[in-house]
Amino acid sequence: MKIRFWGVRGSIPAPGPETIRYGGNTSCVSVHTRSGGLVIIDMGTGLMHLGDELLAGPFGAGAGSATILLSHAHWDHIQGLGFFGPVFVPGNSFAVWGPGGSSEVLEEILEGQMDPNFSPLQTLKNFSARFDVQAMRLGVPLTAEGLTITAREHPHGATTALAFRITERGEPGEPGEASRTFVYASDVGQPTAGGPDPDAVAFYRGADVLLHDATYLPADQATRRNRGFSSYEDAAAAAVAAGVGRLVTFHYDQDYSDDDVDELVAGCRRALDGRGGAAIGLVPAREGDELEI
Amino acid sequence: MKVRFWGVRGSIPVPGRTTSRYGGNTSCVEIRPRGAPPIIIDAGTGLRRLGKALMEEAFGDGRGEASILISHTHWDHVQGLPFFSPLYRAGNRIRIFARHRDTHLEAVFSQQHGAPYFPVPLSAMEAEMSFHALTEGARFALGGATIASTRLNHPWTALAYRVDVDRAAVVYCSDTAPFTDLLLGREFMVCAPSLDRPLPPDVVAELARMRASVVALAAGADLLIYDTQFTREEYRLRPHWGHSHPDDALAIARDAGVRRLCLFHHAPMRSDDDNDAILARYRGIAAAAGDRFEVLSAYEGLELALGDA
């Protein structure tokens, strides 16, 4: 599968000359499967740019379909939805899976963003594409786009967010026939002490690629722990404990310049090495970059 | 007074290489009367940076006061509010003005701030906040400044504001469609309506009244900031989105006899080079028409001193 980063920033889009290299759009990642399936994870402002690219293909002709996974409904994870071109083309279809416990609750949450006080769209019902919203069931694997997807709920400040484990089965007989696994874990609030949560480590275990919240440098996280984000130390500790192949840093703080993120990434490399994770590849998420698994 | 642009973009913030000169933040303009608290128009993502700058002043010690005039509550005009640092400091006083809605303004803004969309509820803001619902056409005083307003042609309507202070006037007219082709209100239009069909006489009259009020509001202003999200050709494809184009803005500026016209609320897809080309083109058109006003295009960081600065 091929992972592509459309938005890697946390909390609020951060335009400006100082964020050009890593990008200022909020969370959105696409996963293209070997068999042509598409999974979109989170709907931050990066989603608009993914949509523009999709419109050049089958989605432009109303012949596209995709699965959308939503970690949680904070603005920076849903604010691109009203600007996602493919939902305005009749014939396209989207299956959205997210938190909320029930499909009605999740749909109501997404409706709230389209409230006429806030959006000229007024309601999700004004989308032309099919847009089915369903609550993800924890611990129950979902089969979509030929992938097996499981979700885990982790703490995120006063609320929770979902992490997703996505597995693509290998073709028998072909090189690299083993299955490949990508884990998306953004907006992860860590316990204050004692290292990574064993349940989280079990969920990440052996992933080829772990994308993990690395919002903060450790010093900044120490003063903002109640916000429910990880530092690069937390990300590195989880990656080493889970024995993953590569770690992707993600969801950079909105106030961090490109130089600050360079520092964060260098710190994360040192943290991996210092914890015995020298063999773990480090891939800083940057808008527009692709990653083949 | 000084006028400074913190967000000049419409619809959605657009970070990136192609927008870094004009800026990718959504609408936010600061008006700073001489020796008086700031009057801020709109709370798009540009408000975040303005808030950081204000924290270097009295707001950092909890002694700041600001008024925020909201043109309308569409996301690109309010999405910076939860990230406005002065709200998180006790002692600051923030007054928010917007056109009245069906629900109380505080309820509208609470919906933006609370679970499940944002971790900190409005009720937890440390600053003292107050909400003031305005009627279309409201006039009122803010310190030494006089504020006037009028209705614009936008889905679910928006307000234009005029701020008179320090012997100068600035007028903010965003978001609005031209007053010629359709009257926008509560109806949702899926597709662009035909622009060639004649309008009912009452709609023509209502649009004419609305345009006359906008021209009157902007009469003799030192600076007119105007929604020019579209080019004329783009407008014809999407007239129901409720945005205007530079040809219309020039006509309003001419009729109102303003001194400067500032193109504003740039479309998300507009690159810096596109904006340069649009500005050059309309400076040429204004010069050829013998217009006496200067044409500017808003960019983040643009600061203008007007009247007694």
Image (cartoon, coloured by chain):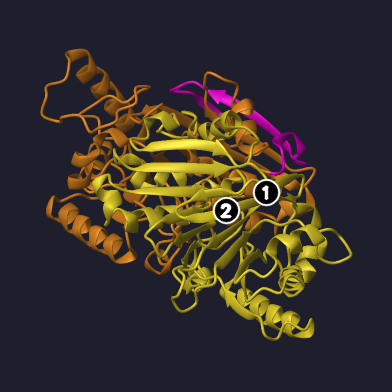
Chain colours: A yellow, B orange
Please name whichever residue, A121 or A171, is drawn nearer the observer in this view of the structure. Answer: A171
Chain of the residue under the numbered disc 2 shown in the image:
A
Residue behind mark 2: A149
Q: In this view, does B241 lie above or below B86?
A: above
Query: Which residue appears farthest toward the front when viewing the image?
Result: A173
> Tag 2's secondary structure?
strand
How far from the left and from the top, in percent, is residue B265?
38, 48
Nearest to the observer: residue A68 or residue A288: A68
Q: Is residue B307 above or below residue A230?
A: above
Does label 2 or label 1 sit earlier along the sequence? Answer: 2
Residue at mark 1: A161
- Amino acid type of the residue that numbered disc 1 sits on in the rendered structure: Ala
Q: In which quarter of the image is residue A250?
A: bottom right
Q: Is residue A71 above or below residue A19?
A: above
Q: Residues within 10 Å of mark 2 (few under 14, many from 20)?
A: many
- Residue A125 rendering spot, x and y as whole percentages: 41, 29
Q: What stretch is highlighted in magenta?
A: B119-140
| Cα–Cα gap, marks 2 and 1 | 16 Å
Residue depicted at 50% across the width and 36% down the height: A133
Q: Position of residue B234 (x, y in %)?
A: 22, 46
| Residue at point 27%, 56% (across, down) | A57
Query: Label 1 lies in what chain?
Result: A
Q: Is residue A215 left or right of residue A223?
A: left
Query: Are the residues flagged by discs 2 and 1 from a single subunit?
Result: yes
Is label 1 in a helix, a strand or a loop?
Answer: strand
